[in-house]
Image (cartoon, rainbow, N blue to C red):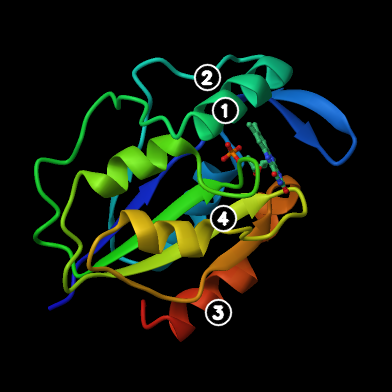
Amino acid sequence: MTKTLIAFFSRADENYFGGSMKYVDVGNTEIVVGLMKDLIDADTFKIEMKKPYSASYMTCIDEAKKDLQANARPELVSYPSSIDEYDTVILGYPNYWGTIPMAVATFLEAYDFTGKTILPFCTNEGSGMGSSEKDIKKYAKGAEVKRGLSINGSRAGSSGDPVKKWLSESGCK
Ligand SMILES: Cc1cc2nc3c(=O)[nH]c(=O)nc-3n(C[C@H](O)[C@H](O)[C@H](O)COP(=O)(O)O)c2cc1C
């Protein structure tokens, strides 16, 4: 029997939604994870930084850029003790400066993905997957990284149809 883990990074607080700033309680990527939980049987793990980025959008933009430029590995609040029981890891994240948030690299490098499949999905405001799929292959040693799904973050709540289609094409039910 195959077992699936949905591991995701998502930030609430102030964000940019098609032209204006707004404070939100749940981030876009986490909204999509909520839709997935209604469609498939999977465990979830939220990738959280010990020192989270600022609630202010503009400050967060700078902090995340510095971490990318420094190739940082921000410490996480916690880690699953093992991911051995999972065959498939659905990996959700926002596009940060054209790729994954560096905390996702911290998560990926903590495990051996040999024999596991990663299904990446990325919420963004227009840059699509960016270089995230290529970068995930670099950090997740041994993983087979399948075709990803790009979702417009501002419309995360109405992405049910493409999410359902992608999950079924990727072999998840
Ligand atoms: C630090 C930062 C960098 C971002 N960089 C990009 C980008 O390069 N391209 C893009 O399309 N959107 C970019 N965005 C927008 C986010 O990818 C988008 O709002 C995403 O849905 C946020 O997901 P979340 O609410 O789950 O954190 C960026 C947002 C932040 C906070």
Q: CA distance from mark 1 to mark 4?
A: 16 Å
Three-letter amino acid code of the residue under disc 1? Ala
At 55% from the left and 79% from the top, the residue drawn is 165
Height in image: 11 above or below 116? above
Q: Would residue 117 be found to the left or right of residue 161 on screen?
A: left
Disc 2 or 1, which lies upstream in sequence? 2
Q: Earlier in the sequence, mark 1 or mark 4?
A: 1
Residue at the spot x=48%, y=64% of the render?
134
Disc 2 vs disc 1: Cβ atoms closer than 8 Å? yes
**What secondary structure is found at the residue carrying circle 1?**
helix
Q: Is mark 2 within 8 Å of ligand 1?
A: yes
Cβ(mark 1) to ligand 1 < 8 Å? yes
Q: What residue is disc 2 on?
A: 53
Tell me the mark number nearer the camera, choosing from 3 and 4.
4
User: Which residue is under mark 4?
Assistant: 122
Q: Which mark is drawn over residue 165? A: 3
Of the two numbered discs 2 and 1 in the rendering, the one whose residue sits closer to the viewer:
1
Q: Quadrant of residue 36?
A: bottom left
Q: Residue 20 placed where, x, y %?
A: 87, 29
Give yes or no for contact between labels 4 and 2 (Cβ–Cβ under 8 Å).
no
